Amino acid sequence: MTPAQINTAIRQRYNAEGDLFFNPQMVWDLIYQAQMVMAHEAFVIERKYTSTSTAGTRELDYPTTAFAIRRIEYDGEKLTPVSIDQDPKTSTTEITGDPRQYALWNNEIILYPTPSATGDLITLYTYNEPQPVAENSVLEVPTEYHLDIIDYGLSLFYAKDGNPQMAAYHDNKWQRAVQRIKRTHAKRKQKDQLVVVRDYEDTPTPYGPYIGG
């Protein structure tokens, strides 16, 4: 579904078509927030980035909207995540070679040892947050979850309109949907390494209900 279609679906179910009390920007914001919840709770937005090494440079920029790393490969070989405190340097001389480990610090990915070659392929597999939503945006969560956003939107419409009973009804449907989405995607994280979160091990959803105008 497009944001415009979700907007129409919410308004039709709420009998609020053309009602500026629920302005379009509110709907774009709540669609963004619903995607954000899915992204952090169920890791549903997956991305792949590629770059190449530069000899003597061990720092890589962390992708802008990524919040967790699933896997990093250097020249086709999987790297092992380590703590920044496990820097394997044993002297003041920088150890160089083909990286086999990486650490995260200050929005950077640090490769160990420092690459000795230029042009080797580096591949990042990440879990990402969504981009802000506008009317013509392409939603970043899988299409099978687009209908669930309608219940999230309805819960906020009812909350803004002062109807806590109906707000709770749709929020309960939304919370059940989130749990279903988490179960659906859990199998994808059972193999390989656990995700490496940029700033913390658990990623609680940072967004509460949006009920602004």
Image (cartoon, rainbow, N blue to C red):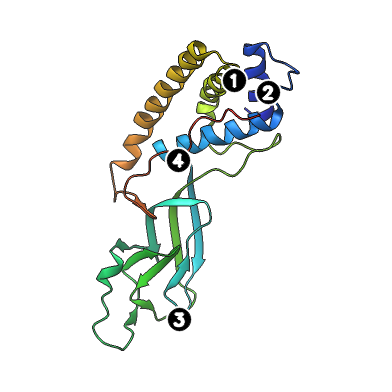
Report the side of 92 relative to 76 (left or right). left
Q: Is residue 45 visible?
A: yes
Residue at image position (52%, 35%) is 35
What kind of element bears circle 2? loop
Q: Quadrant of residue 18?
A: top right
Identify whether 57 is placed above or below 177. below
Name the N-terminal-most of marks 2 and 1.
Answer: 2
Residue found 37% across the figure and 70% down from its top: 111
- Whole-number angstrom distance, CA of label 4 to CA of label 3: 39 Å
- Say if mark 1 contacts mark 3, CB within 8 Å: no
Q: Which residue is mark 2?
A: 22
Q: What amino acid type is highlighted by mark number 3? A: Ala
Name the secondary structure under disc 4.
loop
Distance of label 2 from label 1 (alpha carbons): 7 Å
Residue that mark 1 sits on: 157
In the depicted structure, whether residue 19 falls above or below residue 190? above
In the picture of the structure, the residue carrying the numbered disc 3 is 55
Q: Amino acid at mark 2?
A: Phe
Q: Pointers 2 and 3 in contact (CB under 8 A)?
A: no
Say few, some or many: other residues with alpha carbon within 10 Å of mark 1 (under 14 / 14 to 19 / 20 or more).
many
* Residue position for label 4: 206
- First in sequence: mark 2 or mark 3? 2
- Looking at the image, do the residues carrying marks 4 and 2 touch, with CB atoms under 8 Å apart? no
Q: Which quadrant is home to the C terminus? A: top right
For marks 4 and 1, give the CA distance: 20 Å
**Label 4: few (<14), some (14–19) or many (≥20) C-alpha neighbours in 10 Å:** few
